[in-house]
Amino acid sequence: MADDRSREAQREELAKLRDMVRCEVVLEKEGFRLDREATAQRSARNLKFRRGEGEIIIVNHDGKGWWDATNPDQSARGDVFKLIQHFDPSKNLGHVRRELRDLVGIEPSYEVRERTKPDAGAQDRKRDPAWMWEHRNPPQSGSAAWRYLSEQRGLPDRVLEAAVKQNLLREGPNGTAWFAHRDNSGALSGMEMRGPEYRGFSTGGIGKRLFRFEADPGTPPSRIVVAEAAIDALSFAALDRFARNSMYLSTAGGMSPESVAEFRQVLSLAAKQPDSRLIIAVDNDRQGDHYARMFTAMAQEAGLWSGRLSPKEAGGDWNQVLRARGGKDVEAPRPFGELASAMTPAPTKPTVASGWVGDLAARSGQTLPASAAITEPAAQRSAGGPTPGGR
């Protein structure tokens, strides 16, 4: 189908796609994985990706460029547009543009392709997240990681106890807390790691999938809450009065193509339940705006009602809101379904309505906490506001 937009509009879109989609994302979609050892030996500015035997692509220019290390042809290099055409020369610019649109917002997982040595079996096992997980104990009251989560992060004991019971927490070195990421089959894929002086994601394994904390384990969730970090997901759960049939997810920031596919499957399953909905509990910043747009579109594809709920303070996240309450527990959770008939728009028209929280309060006769409110997109606020706080 012909593109009727002006040439200038088309050029602007091409420039945006070139800027917003990294070559690493395309490579991971095609099955390439980072060769960490070779990359470390060469340079962090030149990332070496491998797929099959003799298939090597080098990414340079901070993810904007690439070249095929096995191809002497000087044309086997370029930007992200040429990379897609490198794998399928039959695709024209229109095909490439449509493919890149689907990759906007996806971050590379940098899942590692390990080159094993015959005598390195024990060391390889120690890099495996499942091995690491089984050789660490869950945090318990008084331990270093428990104190970090309860005293510094303000998470209530009842939430931590529930997370431990669901096998979602482990205690790492130096008071670091590990949060389990699992795929849709339940297999451990990696861990978010947060501590007083450390944040990261485990290397090895199959990379980021989703952290999942359930309000009613064993019950199919009808209400999905997605946050940017596991601590934010647990913080929102602690503040949430409508927890029944809810699942609190974390994407650990940028999503790999695999985690996007799994999240879509979670939404599709939730959409089969009565009164299903997606709560987009992202930070109040430009990155949160970006995730909100992406998650809203995904909810619409699944036929789910969706609404964004972000902290009122610019740059704020949900753990900051929880800590601002001084560790006070909210009232006992109540069924979200009590309000469903009053606030659920037609499921075929999900929106991110600026008045969603206010409408909810007005229709239910509740008083909302002063520390939480729906926010306008950061792009509409004046520039120069505070940057997001650390997790």
Image: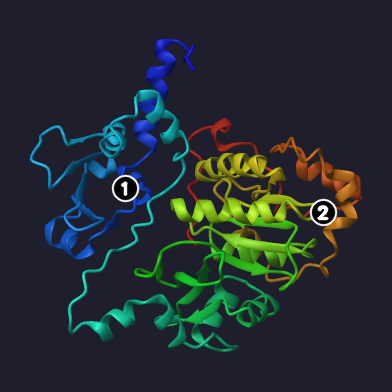
Which residue bears the numbered disc 2? 274
Residue 157 x, y percent position in the rendering = 67, 80
Q: Can residue 354 be seen in this view?
A: yes
Residue 105's place in the image compared with 234, above or below, is: above
The answer to whether 318 appears left or right of 124 in the picture is: right
Q: Residue furthest left?
A: 72
Residue 44's disc is none
The answer to whether 236 appears left or right of 113 in the picture is: right
* Residue in view at x 17 percent, y 44 percent: 68
Amino acid type, mark 2: Pro
Q: Do the residues labelled 1 and 2 touch (CB within 8 Å)?
A: no
Residues 103 and 152: in front is 103
Element at label 2: loop
Residue 338 x, y percent position in the rendering = 90, 56
* Residue in view at x 76 percent, y 38 percent: 355
The answer to whether 277 appears left or right of 89 in the picture is: right
Q: Tag 2 or tag 1, which sits nearer the N-term?
A: 1
Residues 91 and 151: in front is 91
Amino acid type, mark 1: Leu
Q: In which quarter of the image is residue 212?
A: bottom right
Residue 27's disc is 1
* Residue in view at x 54 percent, y 33 percent: 379
Residue 2's place in the image compared with 363, above or below, is: above
Number of other residues with Cα within 10 Å of mark 2, as a class: few under 14, some 14 to 19, many 20 or more: few
Residue 143 x, y percent position in the rendering = 53, 88
Element at label 1: helix
How many numbered markers are drawn? 2
Residue 58's place in the image compared with 38, above or below, is: above
